[in-house]
Image (cartoon, grey):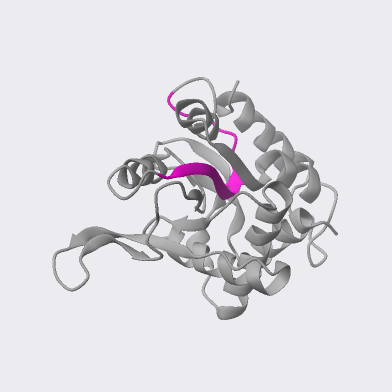
């Protein structure tokens, strides 16, 4: 089983990837939902870091100087990814994250952890990007921290849905900022895997559910 297939299985078993009738914040009706807030144990955090690390190692085995996790959900993701990169690949990358409000006492500032330096190559670690607001805010934040090079964005799932333009939100970020964007898996990979492979004896995506997911992508998917 590839790390992508293992990650899909992991999401189902963790109750993060579920199927049914849901309504997104934008009002769209969707037959599946990804709720990363359902990760809640140390074992899950460790495994999640392994999947991010595998994705980072596959696409960027070098060329990164630090990991950045946008507050709040990105914070534990950057930490566990950095731990896994060291544990499994011998890469000891520093990590940092931002405060929602800059601290005006003590050491001050808006950054916690590693202090980025001019010329650093940064990878942003996020969960699931919807509108891309947190990523855009992170890029703007670094303009006041150091002259860094935002090399890449790593996310757990690419839902392949349209953003504000005909392309996906992740493609918008690629176009607007020239950064590389790597999901651990895409919704297309989820459909293909779970429509053929049962998880704990249950086929999560049968023919009817696959048809609904395909219809959702046809209606809301990026062109």
Q: Going by the picture, which residue comes out furthest to the front?
A: 118
Residue 181's image quarter?
top right
Residue 109 point in image, percent of width and height: 23, 61
Q: Is residue 23 above or below residue 95?
A: above
Q: Is residue 144 left or right of residue 31?
A: left
Regarding residue 222, the answer to whether it shows in the image is yes
Quadrant, the C terminus: top right
Q: Going by the picture, which residue comes out furthest to the left?
A: 104
Task: Please tell me whether residue 125 belongs to the stretch shown in magenta.
Answer: no
* Residue for point 63% across, 46% down: 183
Q: Is residue 119 above or below residue 104?
A: above
Q: Is residue 164 above or below residue 67?
A: above
* Residue for point 34% across, 46% down: 142
Residue 127 point in image, percent of width and height: 51, 54
Q: Which residues are magenta?
A: 148-164
* Residue for point 42% across, 62% down: 96
Regarding residue 72, the answer to whether it shows in the image is no
* Residue 219 or residue 111, whichever sits in front: 111
Task: Please tell me whether residue 161 belongs to the stretch shown in magenta.
Answer: yes
Residue 107 point in image, percent of width and height: 22, 70
Q: Is residue 156 left or right of residue 4?
A: left
Q: Is residue 103 left or right of residue 69?
A: left
* Residue for point 77% across, 50% down: 194
* Residue 8 or residue 92, whichever sits in front: 92
State the count of labels: 0
Residue 48 point in image, percent of width and height: 62, 66
Residue 104's image quarter?
bottom left
Quadrant, the N terminus: bottom right
* Residue 144 or residue 161, whichever sits in front: 144
Q: Is residue 19 left or right of residue 114?
A: right
């Amino acid at each position: 089983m590839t790390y992508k297939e293992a990650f899909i299985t992991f999401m189902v078993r963790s109750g993060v990837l579920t199927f049914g009738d849901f309504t997104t914040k934008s009002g769209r009706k969707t037959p599946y939902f990804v709720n990363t807030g359902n990760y809640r144990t140390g074992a899950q955090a460790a495994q999640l870091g392994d999947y991010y690390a595998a994705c980072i190692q596959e696409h960027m085995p070098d060329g990164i100087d630090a990991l950045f996790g946008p507050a709040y959900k990105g914070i534990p993701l950057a930490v566990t990814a950095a731990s896994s990169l060291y544990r499994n690949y011998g890469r000891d990358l520093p990590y940092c994250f931002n405060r929602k409000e800059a601290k005006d006492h003590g050491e001050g500032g808006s950054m916690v952890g590693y202090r980025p330096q001019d010329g650093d190559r940064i990878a942003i670690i996020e969960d699931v990007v919807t509108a891309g607001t947190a990523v855009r805010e992170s890029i703007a934040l670094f303009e006041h921290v150091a002259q860094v090079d935002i090399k890449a964005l790593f996310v757990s799932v690419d839902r392949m849905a349209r953003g504000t333009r005909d392309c996906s939100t992740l493609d918008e970020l690629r176009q607007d900022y020239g950064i590389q964007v790597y999901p651990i898996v895409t919704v297309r990979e989820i459909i293909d895997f779970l429509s053929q492979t049962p998880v704990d004896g249950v086929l999560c995506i049968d023919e009817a559910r696959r048809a609904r997911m395909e219809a959702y992508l046809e209606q809301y998917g990026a062109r």
